[in-house]
Amino acid sequence: MQNYNKIINNKIFKYLIIFFINYLNLNSLYSMQYLKGYIQTEQDLKSTPQIKVLFNGKEVTSDENGFYSIPLDHSFNNNFNKYYFLACKEIKQNVDKKNTIKYLSIPNNFNYKLYSCLKNNVTGKFELTEEKLIHKDKIIPNNCIITLINPNFIEKIETWNINLNNNFIALPKIKLVSNRTSQKIYRQSDKSLAKSLDCKPFHEEVTIEEKIVNPKVKLVINK
Protein backbone atom coordinates (compact mmCIF):
# COMPACT_ATOMS: atom_id res chain seq x y z
CA MET A 1 0.00 0.00 0.00
CA GLN A 2 2.82 2.37 0.86
CA ASN A 3 4.55 1.63 -2.45
CA TYR A 4 1.30 2.31 -4.29
CA ASN A 5 0.86 5.68 -2.57
CA LYS A 6 4.46 6.53 -3.34
CA ILE A 7 3.94 5.81 -7.04
CA ILE A 8 0.79 7.95 -7.09
CA ASN A 9 2.54 10.82 -5.33
CA ASN A 10 5.45 10.66 -7.78
CA LYS A 11 3.06 10.83 -10.74
CA ILE A 12 1.22 13.79 -9.23
CA PHE A 13 4.52 15.55 -8.62
CA LYS A 14 5.60 15.00 -12.24
CA TYR A 15 2.30 16.37 -13.55
CA LEU A 16 2.65 19.43 -11.33
CA ILE A 17 6.17 20.05 -12.68
CA ILE A 18 4.95 19.77 -16.29
CA PHE A 19 2.02 22.08 -15.58
CA PHE A 20 4.29 24.64 -13.94
CA ILE A 21 6.76 24.61 -16.86
CA ASN A 22 3.92 25.05 -19.39
CA TYR A 23 2.53 27.90 -17.30
CA LEU A 24 5.88 29.69 -17.34
CA ASN A 25 6.25 29.15 -21.10
CA LEU A 26 2.79 30.56 -21.82
CA ASN A 27 3.42 33.58 -19.63
CA SER A 28 6.71 34.32 -21.36
CA LEU A 29 5.05 34.00 -24.78
CA TYR A 30 2.25 36.37 -23.90
CA SER A 31 4.63 38.92 -22.34
CA MET A 32 7.10 38.85 -25.22
CA GLN A 33 6.66 41.57 -27.84
CA TYR A 34 6.74 41.06 -31.59
CA LEU A 35 6.99 43.32 -34.61
CA LYS A 36 4.38 42.32 -37.19
CA GLY A 37 4.65 43.28 -40.85
CA TYR A 38 2.68 42.72 -44.04
CA ILE A 39 3.60 42.66 -47.74
CA GLN A 40 0.54 43.13 -49.95
CA THR A 41 0.17 42.24 -53.61
CA GLU A 42 -2.82 42.75 -55.89
CA GLN A 43 -1.54 40.24 -58.39
CA ASP A 44 -3.54 37.03 -58.83
CA LEU A 45 -0.70 34.95 -57.41
CA LYS A 46 -0.81 31.54 -55.77
CA SER A 47 1.16 33.00 -52.89
CA THR A 48 2.86 36.25 -51.92
CA PRO A 49 6.59 36.25 -52.82
CA GLN A 50 8.76 35.55 -49.79
CA ILE A 51 10.98 38.43 -48.68
CA LYS A 52 13.82 38.46 -46.15
CA VAL A 53 13.62 40.97 -43.32
CA LEU A 54 16.53 41.91 -41.02
CA PHE A 55 16.49 43.62 -37.65
CA ASN A 56 18.78 43.77 -34.63
CA GLY A 57 20.83 40.72 -35.61
CA LYS A 58 17.77 38.65 -36.54
CA GLU A 59 16.52 37.48 -39.91
CA VAL A 60 12.98 36.35 -40.76
CA THR A 61 11.12 35.43 -43.94
CA SER A 62 7.63 36.59 -44.89
CA ASP A 63 5.18 33.73 -45.35
CA GLU A 64 2.99 32.81 -48.33
CA ASN A 65 0.36 35.30 -47.18
CA GLY A 66 2.85 38.16 -46.90
CA PHE A 67 3.03 38.26 -43.09
CA TYR A 68 6.17 38.19 -40.96
CA SER A 69 6.94 38.56 -37.25
CA ILE A 70 10.16 39.60 -35.53
CA PRO A 71 10.68 38.88 -31.81
CA LEU A 72 11.60 42.05 -29.94
CA ASP A 73 14.41 41.73 -27.41
CA HIS A 74 13.54 42.34 -23.76
CA SER A 75 16.25 45.02 -23.76
CA PHE A 76 13.72 47.41 -25.33
CA ASN A 77 11.57 47.13 -22.15
CA ASN A 78 8.35 48.30 -23.84
CA ASN A 79 10.23 51.39 -25.00
CA PHE A 80 10.04 50.83 -28.74
CA ASN A 81 8.98 54.35 -29.69
CA LYS A 82 11.08 55.14 -32.75
CA TYR A 83 12.63 53.07 -35.51
CA TYR A 84 13.53 53.22 -39.19
CA PHE A 85 12.06 51.13 -42.00
CA LEU A 86 14.17 50.49 -45.10
CA ALA A 87 13.54 48.74 -48.40
CA CYS A 88 16.54 47.98 -50.62
CA LYS A 89 17.62 44.99 -52.65
CA GLU A 90 21.06 44.65 -51.05
CA ILE A 91 23.09 45.89 -48.09
CA LYS A 92 26.79 45.98 -47.24
CA GLN A 93 28.15 44.77 -43.92
CA ASN A 94 31.20 46.85 -43.08
CA VAL A 95 33.47 45.12 -40.57
CA ASP A 96 36.58 46.07 -38.62
CA LYS A 97 39.84 44.13 -38.23
CA LYS A 98 38.24 41.93 -35.57
CA ASN A 99 35.51 40.90 -38.01
CA THR A 100 32.93 42.84 -36.01
CA ILE A 101 30.29 44.87 -37.82
CA LYS A 102 31.00 48.61 -37.68
CA TYR A 103 27.90 49.61 -39.60
CA LEU A 104 25.54 48.58 -42.38
CA SER A 105 25.26 50.59 -45.58
CA ILE A 106 23.64 50.62 -49.00
CA PRO A 107 25.89 50.08 -52.04
CA ASN A 108 26.44 53.13 -54.21
CA ASN A 109 23.91 53.78 -56.98
CA PHE A 110 21.35 51.46 -55.36
CA ASN A 111 17.81 52.77 -54.96
CA TYR A 112 16.14 52.60 -51.58
CA LYS A 113 13.11 53.74 -49.61
CA LEU A 114 13.70 54.86 -46.02
CA TYR A 115 11.16 55.98 -43.44
CA SER A 116 11.45 57.12 -39.86
CA CYS A 117 8.61 55.80 -37.70
CA LEU A 118 7.79 57.79 -34.57
CA LYS A 119 5.12 56.76 -32.08
CA ASN A 120 2.38 59.31 -31.44
CA ASN A 121 1.86 59.37 -27.68
CA VAL A 122 -1.78 60.42 -28.10
CA THR A 123 -2.98 57.89 -30.68
CA GLY A 124 -0.40 55.20 -29.93
CA LYS A 125 0.16 54.83 -33.69
CA PHE A 126 3.47 55.21 -35.53
CA GLU A 127 3.73 58.11 -37.98
CA LEU A 128 5.85 57.62 -41.11
CA THR A 129 8.17 60.24 -42.57
CA GLU A 130 10.23 59.56 -45.68
CA GLU A 131 13.95 60.19 -45.15
CA LYS A 132 17.18 60.33 -47.13
CA LEU A 133 20.57 59.01 -46.04
CA ILE A 134 22.80 62.04 -45.65
CA HIS A 135 26.12 60.26 -45.10
CA LYS A 136 28.19 59.86 -48.27
CA ASP A 137 28.66 56.14 -47.50
CA LYS A 138 24.88 55.66 -47.18
CA ILE A 139 25.18 54.36 -43.63
CA ILE A 140 21.98 52.74 -42.42
CA PRO A 141 20.82 54.17 -39.08
CA ASN A 142 20.58 52.06 -35.95
CA ASN A 143 17.26 50.53 -34.98
CA CYS A 144 16.40 49.98 -38.64
CA ILE A 145 14.17 47.22 -40.01
CA ILE A 146 15.53 46.20 -43.41
CA THR A 147 13.44 44.49 -46.10
CA LEU A 148 15.54 43.03 -48.89
CA ILE A 149 13.46 43.98 -51.90
CA ASN A 150 14.04 46.19 -54.91
CA PRO A 151 12.11 49.44 -54.22
CA ASN A 152 11.20 49.61 -57.92
CA PHE A 153 8.75 46.80 -57.17
CA ILE A 154 7.10 48.77 -54.36
CA GLU A 155 4.09 50.95 -55.12
CA LYS A 156 4.06 52.49 -51.65
CA ILE A 157 4.90 51.98 -48.00
CA GLU A 158 2.17 53.13 -45.66
CA THR A 159 0.82 52.79 -42.14
CA TRP A 160 -0.78 49.38 -41.59
CA ASN A 161 -4.09 50.13 -39.90
CA ILE A 162 -4.86 46.92 -38.08
CA ASN A 163 -5.81 46.01 -34.53
CA LEU A 164 -3.34 43.55 -33.03
CA ASN A 165 -2.89 42.03 -29.59
CA ASN A 166 -1.05 44.18 -27.06
CA ASN A 167 2.19 42.23 -27.49
CA PHE A 168 2.34 43.04 -31.22
CA ILE A 169 3.55 46.26 -32.86
CA ALA A 170 2.29 46.84 -36.40
CA LEU A 171 5.02 47.72 -38.89
CA PRO A 172 4.40 49.68 -42.10
CA LYS A 173 2.62 47.82 -44.89
CA ILE A 174 4.50 47.28 -48.15
CA LYS A 175 2.26 47.36 -51.20
CA LEU A 176 3.86 45.81 -54.29
CA VAL A 177 3.29 47.25 -57.75
CA SER A 178 0.58 45.67 -59.89
CA ASN A 179 2.10 46.33 -63.31
CA ARG A 180 4.78 43.65 -63.19
CA THR A 181 4.46 40.05 -64.33
CA SER A 182 4.24 37.34 -61.71
CA GLN A 183 7.51 35.89 -63.03
CA LYS A 184 9.36 39.14 -62.31
CA ILE A 185 7.81 39.41 -58.86
CA TYR A 186 8.81 35.87 -57.93
CA ARG A 187 12.29 36.56 -59.28
CA GLN A 188 12.53 39.39 -56.74
CA SER A 189 11.71 36.87 -54.04
CA ASP A 190 14.51 34.59 -55.22
CA LYS A 191 16.95 37.50 -55.22
CA SER A 192 15.88 38.51 -51.71
CA LEU A 193 16.48 35.00 -50.39
CA ALA A 194 19.84 34.81 -52.17
CA LYS A 195 21.07 38.21 -50.95
CA SER A 196 20.22 37.27 -47.37
CA LEU A 197 22.91 34.57 -47.51
CA ASP A 198 25.51 37.34 -47.27
CA CYS A 199 23.96 38.37 -43.95
CA LYS A 200 24.07 34.90 -42.37
CA PRO A 201 27.33 35.36 -40.41
CA PHE A 202 25.89 38.35 -38.53
CA HIS A 203 22.14 37.69 -38.50
CA GLU A 204 20.46 34.80 -36.71
CA GLU A 205 17.62 33.24 -38.68
CA VAL A 206 14.43 33.05 -36.63
CA THR A 207 11.49 30.90 -37.67
CA ILE A 208 8.05 31.89 -36.44
CA GLU A 209 4.99 29.68 -36.47
CA GLU A 210 1.47 29.94 -35.12
CA LYS A 211 0.19 27.29 -32.73
CA ILE A 212 -3.41 27.07 -31.64
CA VAL A 213 -3.62 26.28 -27.93
CA ASN A 214 -7.42 26.35 -28.02
CA PRO A 215 -9.89 27.63 -30.64
CA LYS A 216 -9.85 31.13 -29.13
CA VAL A 217 -6.13 31.54 -28.45
CA LYS A 218 -3.34 31.77 -31.02
CA LEU A 219 0.28 31.93 -29.96
CA VAL A 220 3.33 32.91 -31.93
CA ILE A 221 6.16 30.51 -31.15
CA ASN A 222 9.89 30.94 -31.76
CA LYS A 223 11.49 27.84 -33.21
Image (tube, grey):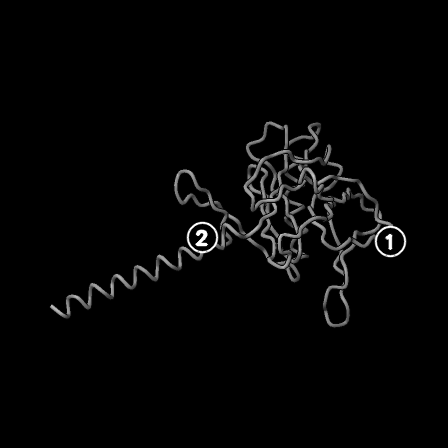
Does 203 appear above or below 64? Answer: below
- Measured as percent of width and height from the top left, residue 57 is found at 65, 58
- The residue closer to the viewer here, 77 or 171, is 77
Amino acid type, residue under disc 1 in the picture = His
Tell me whether the residue at label 2 lies in contact with that at label 1, contact meaning CB atoms closer than 8 angstroms. no
Q: On the picture, is 1 further left or further right than 172?
A: left
Which is more foreground, mark 2 or mark 1? 2
The 10 Å Cα crowd at callout 2, few under 14, some 14 to 19, many 20 or more, is some
According to the picture, the residue beneath numbered tag 1 turns out to be 135
Q: Which amino acid does label 2 sit on?
A: Leu
Q: Where is residue 184 in the image (x, y as percent from the top left)?
A: 68, 35
Image quadrant where residue 151 sits = top right
User: Viewer-proximal residue, 180 or 151?
Assistant: 151
- Name which quarter of the figure residue 169 lies in: top right
Q: Which residue is drawn at 63% across and 37% down?
A: 39
Q: Name the residue under label 2.
A: 26
Q: Distance between the residues labelled 2 and 1?
A: 44 Å
* Along the viewing direction, whichever of 204 and 170 lies nearer the viewer: 170
Q: What element carries label 1?
A: loop
Kind of element beneath mark 2: helix
- Number of residues whose C-alpha sits closer than 10 Å to that of mark 1, classed few (under 14), some (14–19) or many (20 or more): few
